[in-house]
Image: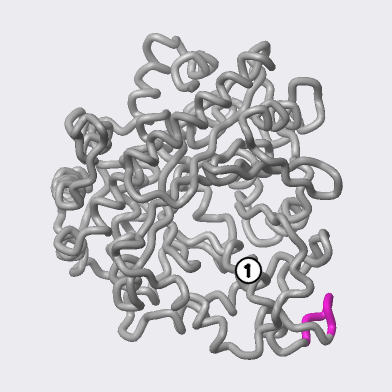
Amino acid sequence: MTTKTVSDSNAAVIGSRDQLIQHFASGEKPQSRWRIGTEHEKFVYARSDHHAPSWDEPAGIRALLGELEQHGWRPVEENGKVIALTGADGSVSLEPAGQFELSGAPLEHLHQTCAETGRHLEQVKAAGEKLGIGFLGLGMWPDKTRAELPIMPKGRYAIMLRHMPRVGTMGLDMMLRTCTIQVNLDYASEADMVKKFRVGLALQPLATALFANSPFTEGKPNGFLSYRSHIWSDTDPARTGMLPFVFEDGFGYERYADYMLDVPMYFVYRDGQYIDAAGLSFRDFLRGELSVLPGERPTIEDWNDHLSTAFPEVRLKTFLEMRGADGGPWNRICALPAFWVGLLYDDAALDAAWDVVKDWTLEERQALRDAVPAQGLSAPIADGGQLRDVAGRVLDIAHAGLKARARFNAAGDDETGFLDPLREVVRSGKVPAEVLLERYHGAWSGDVSKVYDEASF
């Protein structure tokens, strides 16, 4: 989630709805300037007893941030407390219960992405060795209740924690108990954005299945392969889902702006403080009629903040965010951007991917999205088969897209090798959660604590 670093009360005021729409157009870039931004979260735990450390306890989250400052990261404070770091590799931020996130820098190719990820993990593991802290690569806490988890000292989270129970039953689980990997990608034009958005939405259930890695809740199997994905089904219907309007004729920047204007607000950031605006209307804000800031109109930073509070399967800012994957181990961090870059950053691959999904109806796309959290690659698809029947074809398309990009490392390898973990999932027929469940029922003898040995970085 977004971490604020400055006050925006003196920024230029938005004068019209057209400026909100133009904001999306400002993200357009020629293909030569397209970049890859990878974000990945991991759970932090004390090695002594597996508890989730609080911000201020000895050897807790604050101490972890402090250790990373030794590697050149610069602290970001809110109300006098360090809640994030910035540096050459992007930013390190905290999710609501202390999940540790790297929001990577915009990079040209996947070799750089994997090097960035490697640097980050080397740093956090060194800090963890010193503090007695470990890092777990899963999509959901396997053994923690909500009550056992700490809350980080960030103002926006306090507002969201109050609001979530008003609009769904699992929003607090989303905030406190889940981790994800996502990738942020560019577009050249409105038409290019639309095509990528549609392919991304339609194939997001496949990404969810390939990365499904959250089969345990409070120490027991929960009946799902990606419980993290299931959680989104009852988090807040006003700001989640498969966005059917994306597939309608005429979709573009304007239609997405209207969607966001209808998403209820969470907050406004002014002079270092978050003002609770939960449930209020950005349309009212645009007219200067927001009850918590009467007479004041929004800035483009307020619009950016608001864009970050919607959680559909694909999200538009001045780039597109692919949001369907569970958290996982190091090699799958690199596999997710490989999957989407291969499909979306080569024209022939993008066309081929669209051919796979273009005839799926609204009902078929939604049914697939609903089935995947429990069934993974066994989820039924439109032609009567299963998702596994198209998985290999889609990976072949991504492979061809990466091959065509011809981005090589110093050893002469292209980017296609980063798809290997996903190839193994399809070859074996088992998504990561199914492997964990086999171990739970077999070698682990029903002891979910063994996952700390097998899924830690």
Which residue appears at 66% of the width and 89% of the height?
Answer: 15
Left or right: 415 in relation to 374 = left
Type of the residue with mark 1: His
Question: Can you give x and y, in whole percent of width and height, for residue 436 in the image?
Answer: 39, 23
Dividing the picture into quadrants, the one containing residue 178 is top right
Crowd tier of the residue under label 1, counting other residues whose Cα lies within 10 Å: few below 14, some 14–19, many 20 or above: many
Range shown magenta: 289-294
**Relative to residue 419, is residue 132 drawn left or right?**
right
Q: Position of residue 49 (x, y in %)?
A: 67, 14
Residue occupying the far front of the picture: 410
Instruction: Give the residue drawn at x 66%, y 47%.
Output: 172
Q: How is the image coloured?
A: one colour
Asked if residue 93 lies in the magenta stretch, the reply is: no
In the image, is residue 53 above or below residue 444? below
* 290 part of magenta stretch: yes
The answer to whether residue 13 shows anywhere in this view is: yes
Say which residue label 1 marks.
306
In this view of the protein, which residue sits in the foreground, 21 or 149?
A: 21
Say above or below: 305 vs 40. below
Callout 1: SS: helix
